Amino acid sequence: MIQLGVNIDHVATVRQARRTYEPDPVWAAAEAQLGGADGITMHLREDRRHIQDHDVERVKQMCHVKLNLEMAATDEMVKIACRIKPTLSMLVPEGRTEITTEGGLDVLGQKNRLKDVVAQLHDSGMQVSAFIDADVAQIEAAAEVGFDTCEIHTGPYAHAYYDSGSQISAPAVQAELDKVIDGGKRIVQLGMRFNAGHALNYVNVHPIAAINGICELHIGHAIVSRAIFTGLKSAVCEMKSLMVSAAKTS
């Protein structure tokens, strides 16, 4: 069955806007689990703009599902991951001026460095994922480096979907969807786990969740946004239901 990893970063964004103690990401992780989340995703950024070190530590202690730690491939983050030991460490590109992650990791351009990082994380007992664009060369490089999972960046698909007025039949949407599908096929052929995420929401998730071979979607902003009006448990439950329904039709 397709799985849902709920990203709780933006619960911490609200907290950090006032530099206070609420809302607590730990409560968000608990509510997400009650809503049916199969995993919790947290991005510990170098500038600590939302999630803080103690958030990851506390969620790791209470989490009854897998914990996915998004992180840059830096010595500092590798050290933190090896100490906290999440279920999965996902390496992502990171820019101080970006609002959110703007593209996939360039695995091809830094294979030697990433081989060392992946080896260190493996030695500490973690699975390792690469957040990459739907580019065959990057996918093949990820396999060479030793990644267990590739998460395809669905931002281009989601933006094309929105720009087309949510028409799945629009050529631009189909072109981006085909890239995700083809990338997923190559990931599976190379023996890696096929995940996807970024900018997915309640309107555009169905075609992605229906792709054959996809294992897990990581979704955050849309769920936290919906939770303002419905509560987090309900928002997670609704998203999971949409995904499972789509997967059954594939």
Image: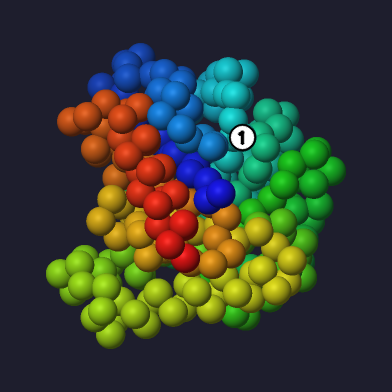
**In the picture, residue 160 is in which quadrant?**
bottom left
Q: Residue at x 62, y 80 (%)?
A: 137
Q: In the picture provided, is 232 more to the left or to the right than 189?
A: left
Asked whether residue 35 is in view, the answer is yes
Above or below, 50 relative to 215: above
Q: Residue at x 28, y 50 (%)?
A: 202
The residue singled out by tag 1 in the image is: 66
| Residue 93 position in % (x across, y down) | 52, 57
Above or below, 229 relative to 152: above
Which residue is nearer to you in this view: 58 or 177? Answer: 177
| Residue 56 position in % (x across, y down) | 55, 27
Task: Tell me which amino acid carries mark 1.
Answer: Lys
Which residue is nearer to you in this view: 160 or 166? Answer: 166
Q: Residue at x 21, y 72 (%)?
A: 167
Q: In the picture provided, is 77 more to the left or to the right than 25?
A: right
Residue at the extreme left: 165
Q: In the picture provided, is 127 more to the left or to the right than 105?
A: right
The crowding category of the residue bearing disc 1, from other C-alpha atoms within 10 Å (few below 14, some 14 to 19, many at least 20), is: some
**In the picture, residue 210 is in which quadrant?**
bottom left
Label 1 sits on a secondary structure element that is strand
Q: Residue at x 22, y 29 (%)?
A: 230
